[in-house]
Amino acid sequence: MQNPSIQVKGLQKSYKKLQVLKGVDFEVEKGSIFALLGSNGAGKTTIVRILSTLFKPDSGTASINSFDVVSDPENVRQSISLTGQFAAVDEVLTGRENLIMMAKLRHLKQPRQVADELLERFGLADAADRRASTYSGGMRRRLDIAMSLIGKPQIIFLDEPTTGLDPEARIEVWKVVKELADSGTTVFLTTQYLEEAEQLADQIAILHEGRVIASGTLQELKKLFPPAKVEYVEKQPSLEEIFLTIINKKEEKLG
Ligand SMILES: Nc1ncnc2c1ncn2[C@@H]1O[C@H](COP(=O)(O)OP(=O)(O)OP(=O)(O)O)[C@@H](O)[C@H]1O
Ligand SMILES: [Mg+2]
């Protein structure tokens, strides 16, 4: 790889007796979109937490912009922005106030102007002065991503950015993600939606039973499977509906 933003080698992590990561390897090229695919509990969020310095790995190495996540967490944090699986929006504040607060935290000179631009860009201008607690899931998600863009991080982590969003809101988020990558930001996203990875990712890695079992471009991955199998998967749309329903219920309970 010419210019890796993220390098991960032999990453292992256990929670007590549960070994979640058993030796994970991958690299992400600067300015590209990388999608980590895996089912519930595969360890996607665990990887995001390690890369964003919230957790330490048991063994193996990970670096961001050549800074080691364990020995150089300060420099890693300067390079990244994290949007977690569950929104970090303050419910009591309005959309505008959330953005202004974040811009102030990042010591930007014109927080109000930064907020206005992002509200416009994310289609939240009309709802700007309503409390975030009155926002729909999709609006909250967009606000969350908008907040993570403040300060123009070089690498952005999006943990399941579109889970629970309706198709329209999902396409809006995709558009934003593509624009980010076009402007040179490296995007690391996790998803359970194959279509999302297909639409967005330059590189895809499939995490299964603690390891990356396949990785490459969509074209490369397609070559691994005979066409008949792809057809079989595509004929099962109801599975996604069931899955979405379950995920939505989970989010409702938590939110
Ligand atoms: N803090 C923790 N303590 C104990 N076990 C944990 C902890 N965090 C995660 N786990 C377990 O580790 C496994 C991997 O969790 P992780 O959240 O990384 O998966 P994920 O791929 O992000 O799943 P999802 O798609 O549901 O978000 C799961 O079995 C989970 O129950
Ligand atoms: Mg997760």
Image: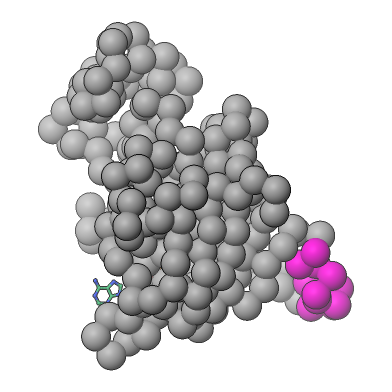
Against 39, is 168 above or below? above
Q: In this orientation, which residue lies closer to the viewer: 46 or 137?
A: 46
Instruction: Give whichever of 189, 116 is nearer the camera.
Output: 189
List x then y, in percent, for residue 21.
43, 78
Q: Is residue 226 magenta?
A: yes
Image side of residue 243 versus residue 113, left or right:
right
Residue most extreme to the bottom: 17
Q: Residue at x 78, y 72 (%)?
A: 230
Residue furthest out toward the left = 92
Instruction: Name which quarter of the figure residue 117 lies in.
Output: top left
| Magenta highlight range | 220-230
Position of residue 109 measured from the top left corner of the image (x, y, whole percent): 28, 10
| Location of residue 138 with respect to 202 vertically, above or below | above
Q: Position of residue 150 (x, y in %)?
A: 36, 27
- The number of numbered discs placed on residues in the rendered structure image is 0
Q: Quadrant of residue 103?
A: top left
How was this image coloured?
A: one colour
| Residue 171 coordinates in the image, percent (x, y) | 58, 39
Residue name at image x 29 percent, y 17 percent: 108
Quarter of the image with the N terminus is bottom right
Q: Residue at x 32, y 57 (%)?
A: 71
Please tell me which residue is depicted at 30% across the width and 66% down the height of the picture.
56
Judging depth in this view, the residue of 31 and 4 nearest the camera is 4
Question: Is 184 positioned to the left or the right of 13 in the image?
Answer: right
- Dominant SS of magenta comes to helix
